[in-house]
Amino acid sequence: MASSGSGYDLSSSTFSPDGRIFQVEYAHKAVENAGTALGLRCSDGVVLAVEKPLITKMLVKETTGRRVHTVDEFAGVAITGFVSDGRQIVNRAREEASNYDETYGTKIPPKTLANRLSAYVHYFTLHGALRPFGCSTLIAAYDPATKEHSLHMVEPSGVTYEYYGAAAGRGRQPARTEMEKLAINPKLVAAASSASSGEGGGSGEGELITCAEGVKQLAKIIYTLHDEAKDKPFELEMSWLCEGSGWKHVGVPKGVIAEATAWAKKEIEEAEGEESEEEEDDDEMEE
Amino acid sequence: MMAPTSADSDAYSGKSAETRHLKPGELSTGTTIMAIKFDKGVVLCADSRVSTGAYVANRASDKIAQLHDHIWCCRSGSAADTQALTDYVRHFLAQLAVETGRLPEVKVAAHLMRRLCYENKDNLMAGVIVGGWDPVSGGSVFNIPLGGACIPMPFAIGGSGSTFIYGLVDSEFKENMTKEEALALCTKAVSHAMARDGSSGGVIRTCVATAEGNEREMIPGNKLPYGPAGW
């Protein structure tokens, strides 16, 4: 499927004749094989979710090998891919945030943090002696100066964009399809509501999903994508920064994750039930 | 008029009370500076005398320096030190504005200034008042005295002449003044300081920084609200 590197893939400081840097593409592959990481920008905050495969039953699963990290009071990241590479990025993000505050006396703006990490990751793609990071980083952050929250993702090539919904890892393609169905993009939501209602007035803002809903939806996406037969058992790590948390980046409370997980599993069963048993009664299945 | 040489300044250096803290021949902005936050922004005000001991090196200097589009600072202490500080902060703020793509906050300018003043306190003699307008906090005033503390205040006074007007300003200041009231208080207070402090004098320069922009004025020495000319 992938074209052969044939000698142009030995170093990340070599272009191929068709203008590609194979080492960076291979780094992307490392991320594509790893647990899914999702980020969702909701009306009142940002939610991050990562599927953490439990490599053995003997792991102290709640606290070890974490893939979601707090970087600053109002910023957090989720990593997927080579998690040891990801740890370096997390440490750098913490340094950048703390340095910025020490120098300028104010919290680092989300976009600036994303750009700094992007420059850092990019640096490793043009050095003969270094290899690129095999890790994608989702950044959830809040800017107290503008009072806006945002989601960014940095890829192994160093490219970074701001997203309403972002996905990386194994299940990113179906995850993106599912996320597009959610009401997270204000322009699409406004267009849809004015098209369906036919009225000119009213902002679409009230119809964007909140973090509480976002947590459930992300849980559902992760559970939908997870193949019980093929993939290892996993733990769902989630964090958010939202109005409810005072915009601080914190882990989603265990109870909320448990509820979301239960809801997600039920939704998935119902969907499967409807597909396979059309003539059965499902009137006892309630929302 | 020739600038004082080191031979001339033997009479000044190390001996007189006014110049003990300066290097030989060094210029001091023994000064009166002031800034007041009002409803729409900040008024900054300063005298214009630059002295070396008893010699007035410049009688019409501009002690209000621009750090960014809507951020200014008043300088007091060693002229060389404050000019260097102003240049550094201006440079860092410009870089920051380009990196973040937006107007820097006044508190960031003040923080940069105070970091420099604090980290180099052994080698500097600079008392600075940073004031301006930004979209996040509106008007803000920060007093950064010798040593590098940074204190946000509704109004600030500084320089050698400020000691004479603490009582006046304390009694006449009120919160949320209009621009005209703030200007009137500034010019009145600085005039009084100029009348009593030998190191302050010349003209009064003002700067009003608001969202719309900056207005700079100069009041010549014979038109001061209070002064030896008697009006």
Image (cartoon, rainbow, N blue to C red):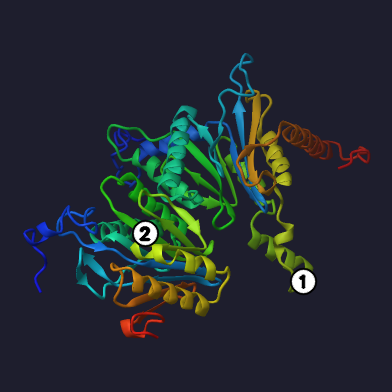
> Split into 4 quadrants, where in the image is the C terminus of chain B?
bottom left
Foreground mark, 1 or 2, reads: 2
Q: Quadrant of residue B53?
A: bottom left
Q: Relative to B75, is A2 on the left or the right?
A: right
Q: Residue at x 52, y 48 (%)?
A: A152
Q: Residue at x 47, y 62 (%)?
A: B141
Q: Residue at x 32, y 66 (%)?
A: B31
Q: Relative to B173, is B224 on the left or the right?
A: left
Q: Quadrant of residue A124?
A: top left
Q: What is the x, y in percent for residue B150?
A: 44, 52
Q: Would you place residue A95 above or below residue B83 in this image?
A: above
Q: How many callouts does the rendering have?
A: 2
SS for dot 1: loop
Q: Estimate how packed mark 2 is, as few (under 14), some (14 to 19) or many (20 or more) residues with alpha carbons within 10 Å.
A: many
Looking at this view, name the residue that lies furthest to the top: A58
Residue B163 appears in view:
yes
- Location of mark 2 (residue): B128
- Location of mark 1 (residue): A198
Q: Amino acid at mark 1?
A: Gly
Q: Amino acid at mark 2?
A: Val
A284 or B140: nearer the viewer: B140
A280 or B3: nearer the viewer: B3
